[in-house]
Image (cartoon, rainbow, N blue to C red):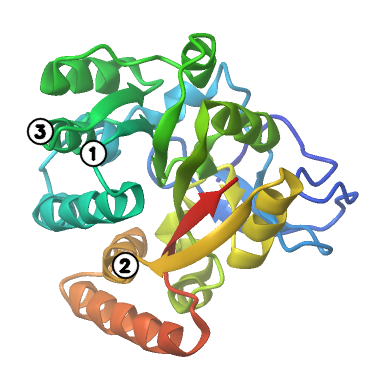
Amino acid sequence: MKEMKGMNIKTCPVCGNILDAEGLKVKDYSVSGEVFEICTCRHCTFSFTQPQPEPSAIGKYYQTEDYISHSDTKQGMVNRMYHLVRKKNTNDKLDLINRLAKKPASLLDVGCGTGYFLSVCRQKAWKTEGVEISDVARRMAEQRTGQAIYPSLDALTATGKQFDVITLWHVFEHLHDINASFLQLSQLLQPQGTLIFALPNLCCADALHYQEFWAAYDVPRHLSHFNPVSLRRLVEKHGMKIEQILPMKMDAYYISMLSEKLKNTAFWGLLKAVWYGWQSNCRAKKDGNYSSLIYIIKK
């Protein structure tokens, strides 16, 4: 296995603590075969991938058909199941933003991928904008939605636009500079607006079970790894607050299936994934640590 060279984080971006701990070694199973570490700040429990590819070099780690949010591939059982579940998840997301905004208003979807969620929102009278850095996914999103998609947060922030709702569905963990990105998101958000993050939760039972095979580590594409404590600290650092935390219960099953795939388990891996996903959700009923969580954030 190859050790990867890149940027090393020496100071915690959440609390400013000096970082010196070694972490869990995790392999990039999707693209490079390189090995990274999941390191954790001893002070605030924020975790991060070490080392991190430079922004100019990160693109090559997304060049795989397995990265479904950029390709829309239906090859393989796991990807076919993803498409089956996506419609329900999208309807749930739409119900959530409708509930939070009271009526169709302005929406920004950051990391919109191929534009599936944006297109559904547009059909329901939302005024939408999207950001997607992948050229391939952005072109697909533009074809699907019939609108231009911004290539970066910088490009959109320069317009001075603001939004009632900003969503990042499993996107914030991909961003290099989380403090600068949070500031941009705050600038783009209306004073009474709502910021929504969906993030993997590394304190969930399936993460503890699968360890280095936990698919939601997804190194080095996932640069940051949050739990409710560390995210709350980051949010409050920027003068905002988490008003509500909601579970994404289906993620426990999906991530467990991907994790079993990484372990190269055969047919029985599917049954194991269902079992461990169910166990993870059962435990989360007691402590709130679901495999993925949705955070509702306000100024």
**Marking on residue 104:** 1
- Residue 224, given in percent of the width and then of the height, sits at 60, 47
- The reply to whether callout 1 and callout 3 are in contact (CB within 8 Å) is no
Foreground mark, 1 or 2, reads 1
Position above or below: 124 against 262: above
Question: Amino acid under label 1?
Answer: Pro
How far apart, in angstroms, are the residues tagged by discs 3 and 2? 37 Å
Farthest right residue?
A: 18
Foreground mark, 1 or 3, reads 1
- Residue at (40% x, 36% y) in the render: 164
Kind of element beneath mark 2: helix
Residue on which the image places disc 3: 123
- Residue at (59% x, 33% y) in the render: 186
**Number of numbered tags placed on the structure image:** 3
Residue 94 visible, this orientation: yes
State the residue in front, 225 or 159. 159
State the residue in front, 286 or 236. 236
Kind of element beneath mark 3: helix
How far apart, in angstroms, are the residues tagged by discs 1 and 2? 40 Å
**Left or right of 243, for residue 16:** right
- Residue at (17% x, 50% y) in the render: 79
Foreground mark, 3 or 2, reads 3
- Residue at (84% x, 63% y) in the render: 43
Residue 24 visible, this orientation: no
> Which one is earlier in the sequence, the residue at label 1 or at label 3?
1
Identify the image quadrant of residue 216: bottom left
Residue on which the image places disc 2: 260
